[in-house]
Image (cartoon, coloured by chain):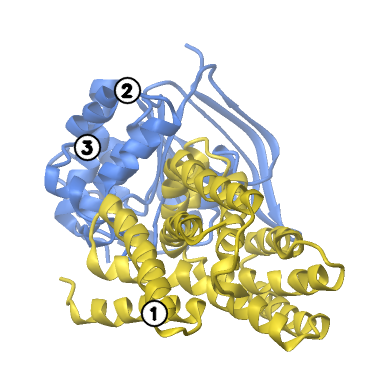
Chain colours: A yellow, B blue
Amino acid sequence: MTEPYSIALAILAAAAAGLVGAFALMKRTILAGDVMSHIAIPGLGLALLWAWDPLVGGGMTLFIGILIIWQLQKKTELSAEAAIGVIFASSVALGALLIHSDEALVDALFGGFKNLSPAEFAFGAGTSILIIVALWLLRNKLIISLFSPELAKASGIDVDRTNLWFLLLFGLAILANLRFLGALLVGSLIIIPASVARQLTHSLNTFLAASVAISVLSMLIGFFVAAHYGIDSGATVVVTAAGFFILSLLKKKN
Amino acid sequence: MQPALIVSGLTVSFDGETVLNDVSFEIAPGESLSIIGPNGAGKTVLLRALLGAAPYQGTITWAKGTRVGYVPQKIDADRHLPINFKNLLAAKADVQHLEPSDVEGVIATVGLTERMLMTPVGHLSGGEFQRSLIAFALLGNPSVLILDEPTASIDITGEQQTYDLIHRLQDTHGITVIVVSHDLSFVYQYATKVLCLNTSGICFGTPSEALTPDALEKLYGPHKYFHYLPRQNAEGNAQSHAHRHGSEKDIS
């Protein structure tokens, strides 16, 4: 399929990443989420080894990783953070062992805009739309839970289940963007736009909207700059987002 | 009249350590129960057990149809959280399928201003934050309001306002109030029942019955309890109820 489809898909995926990132930033689970994206790497390795679709392999290990992190988040001790660190490092190492071809490794880690099959387009677009709709439906439970889990429980919200839903949507947002950014960089399109938006805004709705807008803009600008200069697109997208972040630091918040 | 709450033989242990031991009491609808006791006495644990958030032995029986509103002791709101109480009230109304008019109702009852509603939670003063939390708890029309040290982090003016608000809710809404308080002047002013807690229940009854020098000494240790009494009571007048607006603050 041609470039316009690829761009349309990238916009949808970036919007989903921006929205997920905004909630992750408020929940202060954004770094655990970054670790999560690396859990896709051994899955990508397995997919290459067995000639599966990379997203199937990545999705598989991501799902396992999500369940592990969900369990760990219930514990608050330092051991949970240590365990997340161990999962992160061993995932990257395991992925490097599984992926033999250098070129495939670079793609898995840094992504790129490749040709899309109609099925891939449909799956990708469907995933991103699902993330956005589901987050919108979940938003009120999330808002109360991240403000105070105790109050959320007293208000009749199943905080555990809300957290699991959120992690699953986070995992899907990683999958949706994996094709464009690769496992090493995909976390940054979730972290950076939300961080920029927090610098610039004071209210919930403008924060969410700004995070989505900056994510989509970073994707678009990165894509066109990379195409124009013939450089790596995933990295260009992330550098663009980082540029927005530096600009946002110039604005003093009261 | 059917009691609002009956607690019988309540025992809570964590890792083999008994935090609450065989606590029993009951309160009628519309009453105001104060739970007092030194730090580590198990007051917050008791509230958590009442809310069903801590495992316990014994029985806790709420009257049929009880809806509980809860105001926690402290929430460490991230200063940069771009969320205000307008968002939070709307979120709770959505989760509990309430009407927008319900939200307007609690805003009016508690007296939240538009500015308080629109200010990010981390930028509210202690008193404003507390009022907003009470509004959040009241949304959904609870029959019982549970507050954990509602004035711990606010100044004296805010404290009086908070207590007046709680008392007004009792008068006008007939709401049953359970409040953990370090503040014996509050107990004398507003409580209809008091529970002294130090792992076990040391005294229970109306403040004039329950707060004997003997019970207070048992609770806080010999000669310490005078620090907790309002001045006019410490001067040999400990049985009388203070005037609502006449209490002096002399808690050290």
Residue for badge 2: B99
Residue for badge 1: A228
Residue for badge 3: B165
User: To which chain does the residue with label 2 belong?
Assistant: B
Q: Earlier in the sequence, mark 2 or mark 3?
A: 2
Amino acid identity at mark 1: His
Badge 2 density bin: few <14, some 14–19, many ≥20, Cα 10 Å? few
Residue at image position (23%, 60%) is A202
Mark 2–mark 3 CB contact (< 8 Å): no
What is the x, y in percent for residue B8? Answer: 64, 32
| Distance in Å between CA atoms under marks 3 and 1 | 65 Å
Nearer to us of marks 2 and 1 is 1
Residue at image position (33%, 32%) is B138
Which one is nearer the viewer's eye here, B18 or B95? B95
Residue at image position (37%, 31%) is B93
| Distance in Å between CA atoms under marks 2 and 1 | 53 Å
